[in-house]
Image: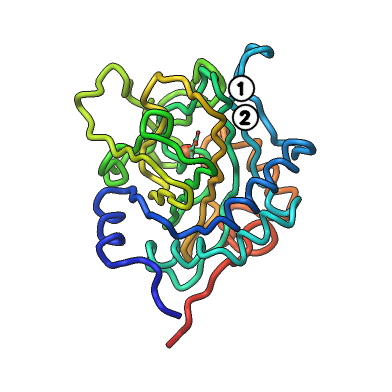
């Protein structure tokens, strides 16, 4: 099968930790995902959350691990170009699902994503990347900002919750031999970082390394509802590796599904989405 991505884009992903990829998802995929999300909102998984405290205010919502609830999500996972793009970026022979989710930031919502890297949220270790695909055009101000090169900091931060106020989960320290730090205050020190931010048209996406720091940088309030479908995927060799107690809720979900520490990210919860031709 021929490649989707140029070697320049792959180099940029490796160097910067996040890359804008334009025009690879046609209208059909955008509509399929919108349909999946509207079904999920009507009938969400038990993991659905509203991150905005005031019940009357426009909200910031998410659901995750809901890919097997709706055919639209399954169709996207197995039949869109997403997994092949992940395999080209990670130079992977095989791509497995790590976690799907979607976010909805309603027009007027004052809440958004804290600065974080996705690696902290899971008991997983390996080479992984994230797809961020907005389902409406979104400008720099209302989207997400990535800190250039932060995937190479060689740091692990304790996780920050998405609930308004963005509390930390746990405190800094050494856990299972790894050092966890509190996320630095990015807002107070904006000048110390170089941010990657893009205006995205329909069909554009951002792929980023699971270690890259990102969040809502601008305080600007969105004028329109903004849905984004996001998906984490892993290269072969990725494993379950227990982290701090903050990941317990997610751990309980995969333990219920028969997984334990050290297992490969494969099988029922982490299906194979793509295999590279051996020739
Ligand atoms: O789109 C958002 O609001 C949050 C995105 C995010 O943190 C992610 O996709 O990992
Ligand atoms: Fe994230």
State how many labels appear.
2
Judge the density around disc 2: few (<14), some (14-19), many (≥20) Cα neighbours within 10 Å: many
| Residue 65 spot, x, y in % from top left | 66, 46
| Residue 267 spot, x, y in % from top left | 66, 64
Q: Residue sitting at 34 percent across and 38 percent down? A: 146
Which quadrant of the figure contains the C terminus?
bottom left
Instruction: Give the residue at mark 2.
Output: 61
Q: Residue sitting at 24 percent across and 53 percent down? A: 15
Relative to 106, 201 lies left or right: left
Q: Which of 27 and 216 is in front in this view?
A: 27
Residue 120 visible to an observer of this rendering:
no
Instruction: Give the residue at mark 1.
Output: 59
Q: Residue sitting at 51 percent across and 56 percent down? A: 233
Q: Nearer the viewer, residue 14 or 104?
A: 104
Q: Is residue 210 above or below residue 263?
A: above
Write down the quadrant of residue 171 in the picture.
Answer: top left
Which quadrant of the figure contains the N terminus?
bottom left
Disc 1, SS: loop
Q: Is residue 223 above or below residue 15?
A: above
Spot the residue most to the left. Answer: 192
Residue 54 visible to an observer of this rendering:
yes
Judge the density around disc 1: few (<14), some (14-19), many (≥20) Cα neighbours within 10 Å: many
| Residue 275 spot, x, y in % from top left | 52, 74
Relative to 71, 9 lies left or right: left
| Residue 199 spot, x, y in % from top left | 36, 40
Q: Residue sitting at 76 percent across and 50 percent down? A: 69
Q: Do the residues labelled 1 and 2 touch (CB within 8 Å)?
A: yes
Write down the quadrant of residue 140 in the picture.
Answer: top left
Disc 2, SS: strand
Q: Is residue 1 above or below residue 215?
A: below
Disc 1 from disc 2: Cα separation:
6 Å
Spot the residue most to the bottom. Answer: 279
């Amino acid at each position: 099968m021929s490649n989707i991505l140029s070697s320049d884009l792959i180099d940029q992903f490796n160097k910067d930790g996040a890359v804008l990829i334009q025009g690879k998802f046609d209208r059909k995929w955008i509509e399929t995902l919108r349909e999946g999300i509207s079904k999920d909102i009507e009938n969400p998984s038990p993991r659905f959350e509203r991150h905005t405290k005031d019940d009357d205010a426009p909200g910031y919502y998410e659901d995750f691990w809901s890919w097997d609830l709706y055919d639209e999500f399954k169709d996207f996972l197995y039949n869109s170009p997403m997994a092949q793009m992940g395999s080209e970026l990670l130079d992977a022979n095989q791509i497995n699902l790590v976690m799907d989710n979607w976010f909805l930031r309603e027009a007027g919502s004052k809440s958004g994503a804290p600065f974080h890297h996705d690696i902290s949220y899971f008991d997983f270790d390996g080479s992984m990347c994230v797809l961020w695909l907005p389902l409406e055009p979104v400008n720099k101000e209302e989207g997400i900002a990535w800190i250039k090169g932060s995937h190479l900091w060689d740091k692990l931060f304790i996780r920050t919750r998405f609930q308004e106020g963005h509390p930390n989960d746990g405190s800094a320290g050494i856990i299972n031999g790894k050092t966890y730090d509190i996320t630095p205050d990015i807002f107070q020190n904006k000048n110390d970082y170089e941010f990657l931010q893009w205006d995205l048209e329909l069909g554009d996406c951002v792929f980023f390394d699971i270690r890259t720091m990102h969040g809502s940088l601008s305080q600007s309030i969105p004028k329109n509802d903004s849905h984004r479908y996001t998906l984490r995927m892993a290269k072969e060799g990725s494993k379950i590796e227990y982290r701090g107690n903050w990941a317990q809720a997610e751990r309980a979900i995969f333990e219920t599904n028969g997984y334990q520490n050290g297992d490969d990210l494969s099988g029922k919860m982490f299906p194979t989405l793509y295999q590279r031709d051996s020739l």
